[in-house]
Amino acid sequence: MSPIAIELAVPALGWALLHFVWQGLLVGAAAGVLLRFLRGASPRWRYAVCAMALFICLCIPLTYLTWSLAQLGSLPSSFQATEVPVWRLELQARMQALVVAWSLGVGVMTARLSLGLVWVSRLRRHSVFAPAIWQDRLDALALRMGLRRRVVLKLHASLSGPVTLGFWRPIVLLPAALLSGMPVAVLEALLAHELAHVQRWDYLVNLLQSLVEGLLFFHPVIWWLSRRMRIEREQVADELGALALNDPGQMALALHELSLQATSGEPGLILSARGGLLFRRIERLMAPPPETASWKLALPALLVACVSLPMQASGPHATLDVSAASLLQLPVNARHVLVLDDAAGKVLMAKDADAVVPIASLTKLVTAMVVLDARLDPDEKLRVAHEDMGSGMQDSALLTAGSEVPRATALRMALMSSENRAAAVLARTFPGGGDAFAQAVRAKIHSLGLTRTTITDPIGAAPSNTSTATELARIVAAAAQYPEIAEITSNKRAEVAVNGLTHELHNTNPLVGGKGWDISLSKTGSSSEAGRCLTMRMRSGDKNVTVVLLHADDSEQRSLDAARIRDLLAHAGGPLLHPHF
């Protein structure tokens, strides 16, 4: 290229970059509107919007630059410059400096990308092949997902989560510690997630995405779109992995286990199940939002319904949805109720479910999760202190000042018999003491996305421990992922040793173990401010449901409410219509 051509091309490139500042804002605004419109749709649609927006952002300056150079090349030799505004001349004079600055930025981004590729290469070299039994599991999953490319499973000692490398010869890397530190079902879910990345050629797309970031690094819309694209990419991989496993709960459990691992500093070139907003991904798997349908598709159905409604009402065979009508009239004593279909994530029944009210000993579900998250020695002996006998503690013949019990026993007593002193000693002996426990509780509430839940003590004696029926259902969903909590709270009775003597504990929920009840998790609570409370997961009819009952008048009314809900769900025919009573 001649010096004159270079002299003409530099301003053309500078103007292309300058114009992209406002052009990129327009693309970002349009993408934002589309993403908001599709917020209830499949993440694949949002991913496509982000990818298309990034592609348009790349094409706009390239098209403008090509057009500008073509215009310069077509100018006649006798062309005379027309009058140009002063501001444009001043910008024109600075174009060379602008292009130099952009070139330096691109150079820095290229170096960053190159270092990432070097790091990926090192990961490959320092990894070792996984045991054959795990390679066979990966091959079986790949076959189930329709993957024809060979995917190699390797182990690496320094990783903290599984990652995917390469696109032509893909490799899934597992931290070596995971093979012995996680259940087989959890590891299979993580592998299914990584295979979903391979199936969609996500590594290659991620590499191209990094190139766009490097060229248009100066525009914040690029980084926003790129971040959203990576979030949606992880959700798409979650969906595909859960589909291959035919069990969204298994994938959600795997993501929850990863959330307990230490945060890693993995660069953006590798694809990992850690990406995205982890709690939202778990929530989406366990309670997927309804798909957002186009209004054009909904309009014909609405017209047909309007036309047919009078005919159905006046016809000789007019029927009423018995399940919906019965639910609307269902008498319940509890003031706040929520019934959630666990499989579909749909609210079946609700009564003032978003009111913030005291939750009493339902608090202990959070206490138990925080203690288990710390992975403390379950056999460590805990000594009950005088401060554990403070105000708000019920009388107990089992735990007195000076009593010693293993941590696992204290946990069982706190959950099964709602022993306040056991919950108090669990919090006091938390690493760092009570203040550290309170901080961990706040972190747990934040990680679960609970914005209307407040917990100020570990036992629930304080009326300031408050939540809503809706958020308690989310707490139950999280607690159900802990096998210890599920096992303890779903047993009718258990024997524990305190001070060398064996004592029998009884579940505070009399429905557990009762005839006709199939309860997989349960917790009760009671106080003068909270009334009688109950939350549980159970199977009723053909449904697995979560039931939350708050502020019933007494324990008998609370149990009657639960029985009415169970019986109605077992006998109701057809889909429920999300009634609120």
Image (cartoon, helix red, strand yellow):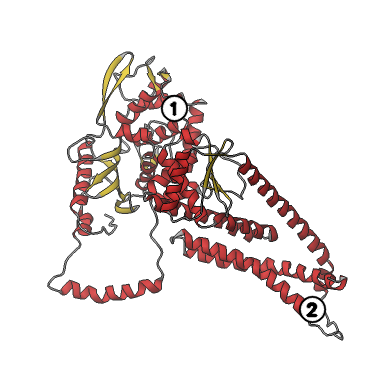
User: Which residue in the protein does label 2 denote?
Assistant: 72
Q: Which of the two labelled residues, at mark 2 and mark 1, occupies the earlier sequence position?
A: 2
Q: Is residue 70 above or below residue 173?
A: below
Residue 218 appears in view:
no
Residue 216 appears in view:
yes
Q: How many marks?
A: 2
Cα–Cα gap, marks 2 and 1: 75 Å
User: Which residue in the protein does label 1 denote?
Assistant: 427
Q: Nearer the viewer, residue 339 or 248?
A: 248
Quadrant where the image shows the N terminus = bottom right
Residue 481 horizontal/vertical position (percent): 39, 40
Tell me if mark 1 has few (under 14), some (14-19) or many (20+) residues whose alpha carbon lies within 10 angstroms of its own.
Answer: many
Residue 2: which disc? none
Secondary structure at badge 1 equals helix
Q: Is residue 308 above or below residue 358?
A: below
The single residue placed furthest to the left in the displayed view is 316
Q: Nearer the viewer, residue 518 or 466?
A: 518
Residue 285 horizontal/vertical position (percent): 41, 51
Disc 1 residue type (three-letter): Ala
